[in-house]
Image (cartoon, grey):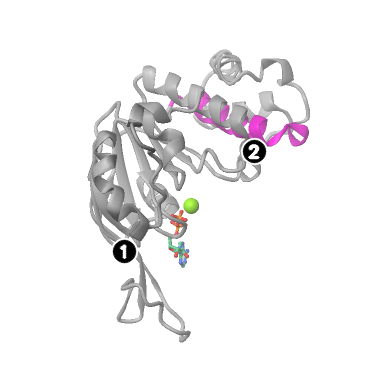
Amino acid sequence: MELSGVTRRFRLGTGPAAGDGRVREGFFYALDGVSLAVEAGEFVLVCGANGSGKSLLMSVIAGLDAPSSGRAAAEGRVGIVFQDADSQILGETPREDAAVGPKNLKLPRDEVNRRVDGALRAVGLTAKADFPARFLSGGEKRRLSLAGVLAMDCPVIIFDEPYANLDFPGVRDVNAALESLKGAGKTVFVLTHELEKGLALATRLVILASGRIVFDGPPEALPSLRERLGAWGIRYPLGAYMTVGDLLWR
Ligand SMILES: Nc1ncnc2c1ncn2[C@@H]1O[C@H](COP(=O)(O)OP(=O)(O)O)[C@@H](O)[C@H]1O
Ligand SMILES: [Mg+2]
């Protein structure tokens, strides 16, 4: 997966100009010269404050949005688990919902059933496979969105704010699912403003601020960023004597 010099800008109306350097010549630069090359099997934590450009970056990687300039390329399908699970659930039941993707791929019916069963089992929804999807809890709906992506067997999977509105067991469930995808060799992107929840799983940390990549390196470099995180709108999560490895929620 490679982005080179990706810029995505939106024309502004006549309102007041924002003051953070993202406004130039009547455009708001939501992504501003983003270059990122990610190899198969990497686990990239993309961290940034609200509005830094995470969701837009995801849309560009997945081909749902086109850059205004620059180039984006991905080998193979990119699966997305959206922040708002409700907008992603299309079926009346989990079984029906998880089948939407594989059916669109025009797979034979046996293969669709095999994938749906496997995906629902992987996210722990087998018992509720024929339950009305609208009555699932928030965490279960998010797991169902993941099942849909698993059933498509995408080599690259992007999670947009997977920890939003989840309690401690919910965060642990998400991390267990992320860890097993990592073990299966998938390329994983986790977009979050909650650095501490996913960092210990990551092999790479990318920090976005005002539409630009301001850091790209190993998670272990976090202590060296301590003084700069506040300016990027991110809380420093380590206490005295803690390491990145201590952060994992499980
Ligand atoms: N279609 C759009 N039109 C205008 N502005 C947009 C559009 N999509 C995103 N933006 C702006 O781009 C910036 C980045 O948005 P987004 O990627 O959603 O941020 P994040 O996911 O990091 O919170 C925001 O300021 C947002 O308002
Ligand atoms: Mg977002």
Helix, strand or loop: magenta stretch: helix
Q: What residue type is labelled 2?
A: Ile
Task: Specify the amino acid type for callout 1.
Answer: Ser
**Which residue has dot 2 on it?**
89
Region in magenta:
133-153
Disc on res. 76: none
Image point 64% across, 38% down: which residue? 89
Mark before the other along the chain sequence, 1 or 2: 1
- Asked if ligand 1 lies within 8 A of label 1, the reply is no
The answer to if 136 sits in the magenta stretch is yes
> Where's residue 185, x and y in %?
34, 20
Find the distance from the CA under tag 1 to the CA under tag 2.
30 Å
State whether residue 100 is above or below residue 123.
Answer: below
Q: In this view, does 179 lie to the left or right of 227?
A: right
Tag shown at residue 68:
1
Front position in the image: 30 or 244? 244
Write the residue at 77% across / 25% down.
131
Residue 148 is inside the magenta segment: yes
Q: In the current view of this chain or complex, which residue is farthest to the front?
A: 240
Q: Where is residue 13 in the image (x, y as percent from the top left)?
A: 46, 82
